Image: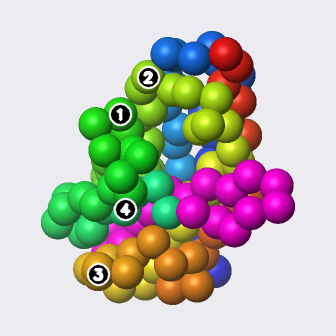
Amino acid sequence: QEQLVESGGGSVQAGGSLRLSCASSRDTYSTYCMGWFRQVPGKGREGVAVIETDGTTQYSDFAKGRFTISRDDAKNTLYLEMNNLTPEDSAMYYCAARGVRWCGGVWYRPGLYDYWGQGTQVTVSS
């Protein structure tokens, strides 16, 4: 059973930065498509970014130019660097893992992912 544990959330002012981390319990982490999603109350889970096993990344339009997803396979850890945050970025952020190497063109669909973390809250004040 894959276990994903997020950390790094918190409260920041608009324009600030945060770095989220997601630690995986499995050595097979390096063979998985990994992603970040976010969710606000009353809305569905929204894809933020994904990274494939070869390091290829994809981002939602709102994340391009501000967020950077990366992975350290030696540490079984996924990261999300978030810069120039706005109040609209406030949400619970989730790490997700999919048991395939390539994330594909519809990577933003939450139902495709096999494992989820418990989430870490990000709050951005104006």
Q: In which quarter of the image is residue 7?
A: top right
Q: How far apart are marks 2 and 4 (CA)?
A: 20 Å
Badge 2 crowding class, 10 Å Cα cut-off, few under 14, some 14 to 19, many 20 or more, is: some
Identified at 71% across, 30% down, the residue is 123
Q: What residue type is labelled 3?
A: Gly
Query: Element type at marker 3?
Result: loop
Badge 4 crowding class, 10 Å Cα cut-off, few under 14, some 14 to 19, many 20 or more, is: many
User: Residue 66, labelled with which disc?
Assistant: 1
Looking at the image, is mark 1 or mark 4 earlier in the sequence? 4
Q: Which residue lies under the disc numbered 3?
A: 104
Q: Is residue 121 left or right of residue 101?
A: right
Q: Distance between the residues labelled 1 and 3?
A: 22 Å
Confirm whether residue 27 shows in the render: no
User: Residue 84, labelled with which disc?
Assistant: 2
Q: Which amino acid does label 4 sit on?
A: Val
Q: Do the residues labelled 2 and 4 touch (CB within 8 Å)?
A: no
Q: In this view, does 81 lie to the left or right of 90?
A: left
Q: Do the residues labelled 1 and 2 touch (CB within 8 Å)?
A: yes
